[in-house]
Amino acid sequence: MGYIFMIVVGVILGWQAAFMQRVETGRAMPRFIGAGVLGAVLTGLLLTPLLTHGDLGSGTYTVDALLLTMAGALVALFACNVLYRCDLI
């Protein structure tokens, strides 16, 4: 269930970021959604067990693990936004 949560959080945050920046057309929307999913999954699998008592991969849910996963998706989206604005992706 933790994997589904990480993917859903990444998709929602990626879509929201693309919508707020008005880049709903073309290849930008899948890039933002992919960046959100990648950030959420990597943070949920790698950083959450190291920094919190929860582990989303094994099903141990804590509020700080969920918030850290959302923060990881937002950091990945910020990096994608910077690269998108600089025309690097």
Image (cartoon, rainbow, N blue to C red):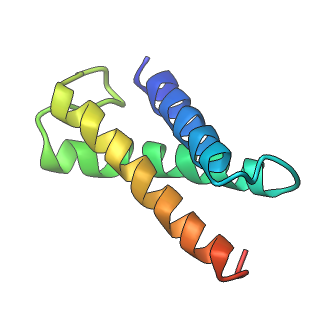
Q: Can residue 63 be seen at all in this image of the molecule? A: yes
In this view, 10 is above or below 35: above
- Give the quadrant of the C terminus: bottom right
Residue visible at 75% across and 49% down in the picture: 29
Residue 47 point in image, percent of width and height: 27, 51
Residue at far left of view: 53
Residue 53 point in image, percent of width and height: 11, 34
Residue 67 sits in quarter: top left
Residue visible at 60% across and 35% down in the picture: 11
Residue 63 point in image, percent of width and height: 19, 26
Q: Can residue 42 be seen at all in this image of the molecule? A: no
In this view, 26 is above or below 84: above
In-image side of 75 versus 58 (left or right): right
In-image side of 74 versus 46 (left or right): right
Residue 52 point in image, percent of width and height: 13, 41
Query: 7 or 14: nearer the eye?
Result: 14
Numbered-mark total = 0
Query: 11 or 46: nearer the eye?
Result: 11
Query: 26 or 60: nearer the eye?
Result: 26
In this view, 80 is above or below 34: below
In this view, 88 is above or below 39: below
Residue 1 sits in quarter: top left
Residue visible at 27% across and 43% down in the picture: 68
Residue visible at 57% across and 48% down in the picture: 17
